[in-house]
Image (cartoon, rainbow, N blue to C red):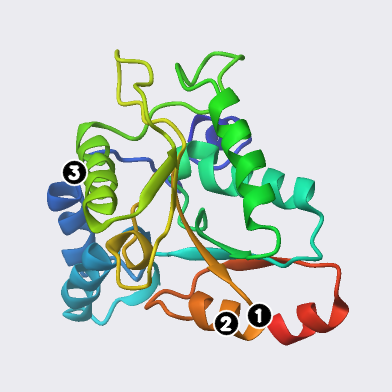
Amino acid sequence: AERILQHGLPAGVFNCVTGLGSSIGNAIVDDPRIRAITFTGSTEVGKKILVRGSANLTRMQLELGGKNAIIVMDDADLNEAVTATTTAGFSNGGQWCTSTSRVLLHRGIAKQFLEALVARCEKMNVTDGMSESTDMGPVAGPQQFEDISKAIRQAQADGATMIAGAGAADPKGYFIRPTVFTGVTTKMAAFRDEIFGPVLAVCEFGSLDEALELANNSIYGLSSAIFTKGLGNAKKYI
């Protein structure tokens, strides 16, 4: 906001207001002078904004939850695929709406891929986000930390296997280590629910058709990716 003012935009045109959505957010949504609203956040809150804003026929643009899948075929460049999965899954603590959260692996390369992914996870430095040596900083706050921790405990209770993430990160803040679960089924919360944290749910498949069925088995449709050297695979995916 300060940069925008420094570059000449008249004062009052762009405003940055921080606070709880239940107070500031409601005041903005309920005000009939507001002509349009764009919101990025959870599906639950998006529904509430849509209902409240409709009283004034306010135009809406809602970018809500995601459970984004990456498909890795058996002909993929595994180094590139692992790098992309690490970046997309753990950058910003997995707290992008478009963060990768489901990793769908062809059985032919699953073992090799996971070994490389776990090695990357174990090397990641999870600490102060302002440090140059940090690979991943904390999650957004105490509630986010508890929600992610609860989702991890639920995945374990459901029978998924944690192959990365065990052990404490920096105990002086809301830090969660990059976490990877295998043995995830489509009925598990880890597969179906948005966690919005550094947690990857891994499923294996035998064919592209099976992979696409897994990827589409979600109420979300925000983003996805495929790693393959086969043009036919890429076209079918699209």
Residue at 66% x, 80% y is 208
- Residue 141 appears left or right of 200: left
Q: Dividing the picture into quarters, in which one does residue 106 lie?
A: bottom right
Q: Is residue 187 above or below residue 117?
A: below
Number of numbered markers: 3
CB atoms at circles 2 and 1 under 8 Å apart? yes
Give above or below for 145 relative to 99: above
Q: Secondary structure at mark 1?
A: loop
- Residue 203 seen: yes
* Callout 2: SS: helix
For residue 207, which numbered disc appears in the image? 1
Q: Amino acid at mark 1?
A: Ser
Task: Give the camera-side residue of 209 and 44.
Answer: 209
**Label 2, label 3: how far apart the Cα atoms are:** 42 Å
Q: Which residue is mark 3?
A: 20
Residue at 33%, 53% (x, y): give it.
195
Q: Which residue is mark 2?
A: 210
Viewer-nearest residue: 238 or 20: 238
